[in-house]
Amino acid sequence: MLTAALLALAVLWLLPIVWVVVTSLKTTAEIVKVPPEWIPWPATGAHYHEVLLGSSRTARIGRAFANSIVVAVGTAVVVLVTSAMSAYALARLRFPGRGTVFTVLVGSLMIPNAVVLVPQYVLVQQLGWLSTFQGLIVPEAATTFAFGVFLLRQFFLTMPGELEDAARIDGANAWQVFTRIVLPLSQPVLAALGIFAFRSAWNDFLWPLIAVNKPDMFPLPVALALLRSAYSSESYGPIMAGAALSALPLFVVFLVANRRIVEGVRLSGLKG
């Protein structure tokens, strides 16, 4: 009974995704056909060609796709580097105020992003980062940083200290212990955090909408919104093609790294 219910739920969840892909492969006549057909024949890639290489309304989608890749990958790298070093310090080093720093970081997770939107915009404007990659990457990374520190700290607390002690006896300094012992053992958790940061930056719409005013710097979510406004309500083909393209990187990343995601979350939750 439970299996059947879960299967039905999975089908319900996948149905809109399948419909987006199927619609993107139909001709305009097939899209508006009643009753609708689930299997387009012959399938066409014309809508993808139009979105990526077509008219001036959609010519920037390809550039927006590249922009989103840069922002998402850059955000993931910044989050991994800063969160790993900070989490290791909070888990292993002894210094005054360590508990207070961690409490403040965890507490910041309770603050909605909308609360810091205005001061964040003012700061980015004063730095001259509007409509730049750093103006997108740094704020995106900041929203995921606290979660990354929390996740990695929980994992570092589960690691046996004997491994680090043995490395120090062999003459390794703190940086060598961190890079050669701790980080290699943390790969599953780092993979999970990196994918989480990538997904968060890839899907973000509000901050790029506010911080970018140059069309050539728009990431994919903003460009897709403009694409939707460029077409009439009956021109679903290019819109569905753009939506399918926006989901493709996340789908590929999950297929490649889904085991590491599950393993990373499991390992980080062993100890509170």
Image (spheres, grey):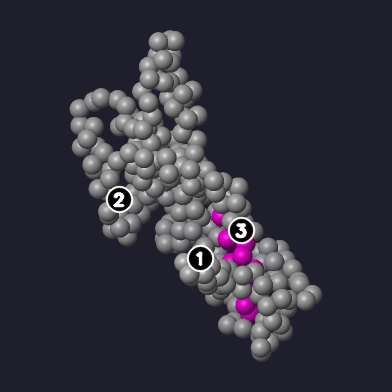
Q: Left or right: 207 with respect to 105? A: right
The C terminus sits in image quarter: top left
Residue 99 in percent (x, y) is at: 22, 35
Instruction: Return the disc, 1 or 2, that comes first in the chain's sequence.
Output: 1
Which mark lies nearer to you, 3 or 1? Answer: 1
Q: Amino acid at mark 1?
A: Thr
Q: Say which residue label 2 marks.
A: 109
Magenta stretch holds residue 264: no
Instruction: Return the disc, 3 or 1, that comes first in the chain's sequence.
Output: 1
Instruction: Give whichever of 149, 45 is nearer the camera.
Output: 149
Q: Left or right: 112 with respect to 73? A: left
Residue at x 20% of width, y 37% of height? 100
Which mark lies nearer to you, 1 or 2? Answer: 1
Q: Left or right: 74 with respect to 126? A: right
Q: Amino acid at mark 2?
A: Leu
Instruction: Return the disc, 3 or 2, that comes first in the chain's sequence.
Output: 2
Residue at x 30% of width, y 58% of height? 112
Residue 90 in percent (x, y) is at: 30, 32
CA distance for labels 1 and 2: 35 Å
CA distance for labels 3 and 1: 28 Å
Q: Say which residue label 1 marks.
A: 3
For mark 3, give the secondary structure. helix
Residue 248's label in the rendered image is 3
